[in-house]
Amino acid sequence: MKNETGLIFLGAPGAGKGTQAQLLAEFLQVPHISTGEIFRNAIAQKTVLGLQARSYVDKGELVPDELILDLIRERLSQSDAQKGWILDGFPRNVSQASFLDELLCELNQSSDYVVNLEVPDEVLTTRLLLRGRKDDNEQTIRRRLQVYREQTAPVIDYYRDRGRLHSVDGDRLPEEVTESLKQIVISIPDRD
Ligand code: AMP
């Protein structure tokens, strides 16, 4: 396995991105960067970002790009991100995906793999209702899945078209999903 590993995690709300990204980040010893987590912390701490993002997160809408792009630039510029990272929840639309491509180029970094966790719709809703986060009520869940289909699903095609997509069946036991993900990252070839 090479030293720097940049992984992008895609998947609908409830697909298990957060759990799997966290486990894999520990395995690879790289930071787990969750934009949803960044927003939830900012909201809890009532920072300016939190106050601006709150109504969007509560409604299940995407936070506007202008609130997140600088934040991603800063986070990926930090020293702990120079050895790799796992992005969970970003990019969430095609304009964020093309921004990320340019940013990685500018920072002399790369995303080695884009992983899409595939889980059937009916399983997603059941999982989200069981999870019980503040934005996991029925109305918000419906909106988040709709936003996912309209704005985030095209990101899958964006990476598929560029030959960078790895699909993983996320409708299995968590440890089986983790095992498949480890197999993917272990096979990442060295970059020279
Ligand atoms: P998540 O924890 O990834 O499900 O994100 C929770 C919420 O944070 C989403 O429903 C959005 O409101 C917001 N959010 C997270 N990541 C992004 C992003 N990349 N762009 C816009 N909004 C985001």
Image: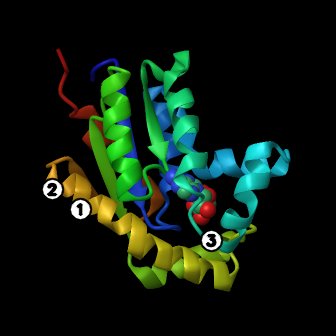
Could you say whether the residue bearing mark 3 is in a helix, strand or loop? loop
Whether residue 55 is visible, yes or no, is: yes
The answer to whether marks 3 and 2 mark residues whose Cβ atoms lie closer than 8 Å is no
- For this view, does 10 lie left or right of residue 89? left
Instruction: Name the image quarter holding the N terminus.
Output: top left
Whether residue 176 is visible, yes or no, is: no
Q: How is the image coloured?
A: rainbow
- For this view, does 48 lie left or right of residue 131? right
**Ligand 1 within 8 A of label 3's CB?**
yes
From the top left corner, tell me how far across and down residue 36 is, in percent. 61, 53
Kind of residue at disc 1: Asp
The answer to whether marks 3 and 1 mark residues whose Cβ atoms lie closer than 8 Å is no
Question: How would you rate the neighbour count of disc 3 (Cα within 10 Å): few for under 14, some for 14-19, many for 20 or more?
Answer: many
From the top left corner, tell me how far across and down residue 172 is, in percent. 39, 66
How far apart in space, not on screen, are marks 2 and 1 (Cα)? 6 Å
How far apart in space, not on screen, are marks 3 and 2 (Cα)? 28 Å
Could you say whether the residue bearing mark 2 is in a helix, strand or loop? helix
Which mark is first along the chain, 1 or 3?
A: 3
Quarter of image, ligand 1: bottom right
- For this view, does 51 lie left or right of residue 75? right
Which mark is first along the chain, 2 or 3?
A: 3
Residue 190 lies in quadrant:
top left
Kind of residue at disc 3: Gly
The answer to whether marks 2 and 1 mark residues whose Cβ atoms lie closer than 8 Å is yes
What residue does disc 1 label? 157
Instruction: Name the image quarter holding the C terminus.
Output: top left
What residue does disc 2 label? 161
How far apart in space, not on screen, are marks 3 and 1 (Cα)? 22 Å
- State the residue at coordinates (56%, 28%): 74
From the top left corner, tell me how far across and down residue 151 is, in percent. 41, 68
What residue does disc 3 label? 60
